[in-house]
């Protein structure tokens, strides 16, 4: 069990939560995740680690309140304990001096790109973040992202901040205008990261995306998180969750994402 010491709703249905987890904080690297269970009746849920402090022994994560388990998680208060909290899991992002790196984040992925931007900046890269939401009031951590980036480019679907549209539209515009990034990294919903992959494909820009399939054990044993990359079966939990976006079989991803849709709706209604 881990104790919640900070919890804030940072945008409608999006929460930031900090827990005391020193064993995890001391080992975490950018891009890793935890699998948590809010209480003994909930399912196991993988969540990206957005920030951590090895000295204080704290771990921060951002989550979207979307199904029964994340609703239960959202109900927990400061001082409450999360029933199970396992990590850090997965391989970290490769951090090197690539030159110019574009980081695309939407929804929980805005928190997800923060530690990666910070690590890449410390390595000497020029870091350009793309932060997207449906509207300005749904964006968060703008200050934190700006602190660790050379530039943050905002896009909102309603045009209330930055460019009107999605981050992948803005990225495409930038590529068309001659921007030549050495690497693009995207964290967020499957649709967004897929669109980023398709935007960069014709330009041949190396693109790494953070995959978010259903996971159960998170240690390579159950096979629930399998996906096809470069014609080979991979497990997102142990081989990833970061993969070359241009080698992923996206058709399989789309069909597997919907496998439990009906059960998710029923579970939500019952909850
Ligand atoms: Fe079970 Fe990856 S979650 S193999």
Image (cartoon, rainbow, N blue to C red):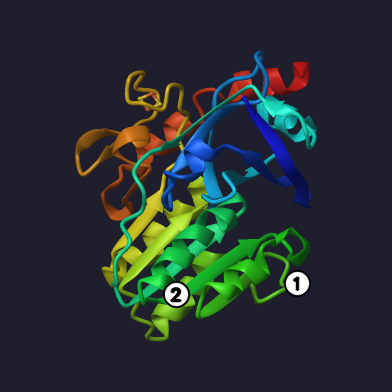
Circle 1 sits on which residue? Answer: 160
Q: Residue at x 69, y 59 (%)?
A: 134
Name the residue beneath numbered marker 2.
Answer: 127
- In the image, residue 141 lies at what x, y percent? 66, 63
Q: Quadrant of residue 252?
A: top left
Which image quarter is the N terminus in? top right
Most extreme residue toward the bottom is 177
Asked if one can make out residue 156 in the rendered structure from this viewpoint, the answer is no
Please report the residue visible at 68 percent of the width from the left and 19 percent of the height from the top. 39
* Residue 82 placement (x, y as % from top left): 66, 27
- In the foreground, 42 or 179: 42
Which numbered disc covers residue 112?
A: none
Give the residue displayed 36% in from the left and 49% down from the top.
92
Q: Which callout, 2 or 1, points at the residue further toward the start of the chain?
A: 2
User: Residue 65 occupies which quadrant of the picture?
Assistant: top right
Point 66% across, 44% down: residue: 18
For the view shown, which residue lies furthest in the front direction?
Answer: 55
Left or right, 243 with respect to 78, comes to left
* Disc 2 packing (10 Å; few <14; some 14–19; many ≥20): many
Q: Is residue 267 left or right of residue 53?
A: right
Kindly tell me whether residue 271 is visible in this rendering.
yes
Disc 2 under 8 Å from ligand 1? The reply is no
Residue 260, percent across and down? 54, 22
Give the Cα distance between marks 2 and 1.
24 Å
Relative to 214, does residue 49 appear above or below in the rendering? below
The residue nearer to you, when weighing 224 against 16, is: 16
Ligand 1's image quarter is: top left
């Amino acid at each position: 069990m881990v104790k919640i010491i900070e919890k804030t709703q940072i945008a409608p249905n999006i929460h930031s939560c900090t827990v005391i987890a020193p064993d995890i904080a001391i080992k975490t690297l950018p891009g890793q995740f935890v699998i948590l269970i809010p209480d003994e009746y909930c399912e196991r849920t993988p969540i990206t680690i957005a920030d951590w402090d090895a000295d204080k022994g704290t771990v921060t994560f951002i989550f979207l309140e979307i199904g029964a388990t994340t609703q239960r998680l959202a109900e927990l208060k400061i001082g409450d304990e999360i029933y199970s909290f396992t990590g850090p899991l997965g391989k970290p992002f490769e951090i090197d001096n690539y030159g110019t790196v574009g980081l695309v984040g939407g929804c929980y992925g805005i928190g997800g790109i923060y530690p990666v931007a910070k690590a890449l900046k410390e390595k000497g890269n020029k870091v350009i973040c793309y932060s997207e939401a449906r509207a300005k009031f749904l964006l968060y951590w703008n200050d934190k992202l700006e602190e660790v980036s050379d530039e943050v480019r905002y896009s909102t679907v309603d045009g209330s901040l930055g460019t009107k549209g999605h981050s992948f539209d803005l990225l495409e515009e930038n590529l068309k205008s001659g921007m030549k990034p050495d690497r693009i990294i995207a964290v967020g919903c499957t649709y967004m990261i897929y669109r980023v992959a398709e935007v960069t494909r014709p330009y041949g820009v190396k693109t790494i995306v953070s995959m978010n399939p259903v996971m159960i054990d998170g240690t390579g044993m159950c096979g629930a998180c399998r996906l096809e990359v470069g014609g080979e079966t991979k497990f997102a939990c142990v081989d990833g969750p970061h993969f070359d976006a241009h080698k992923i079989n996206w058709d399989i991803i789309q069909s597997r994402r919907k496998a439990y849709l009906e059960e998710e709706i029923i579970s939500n209604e019952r909850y």
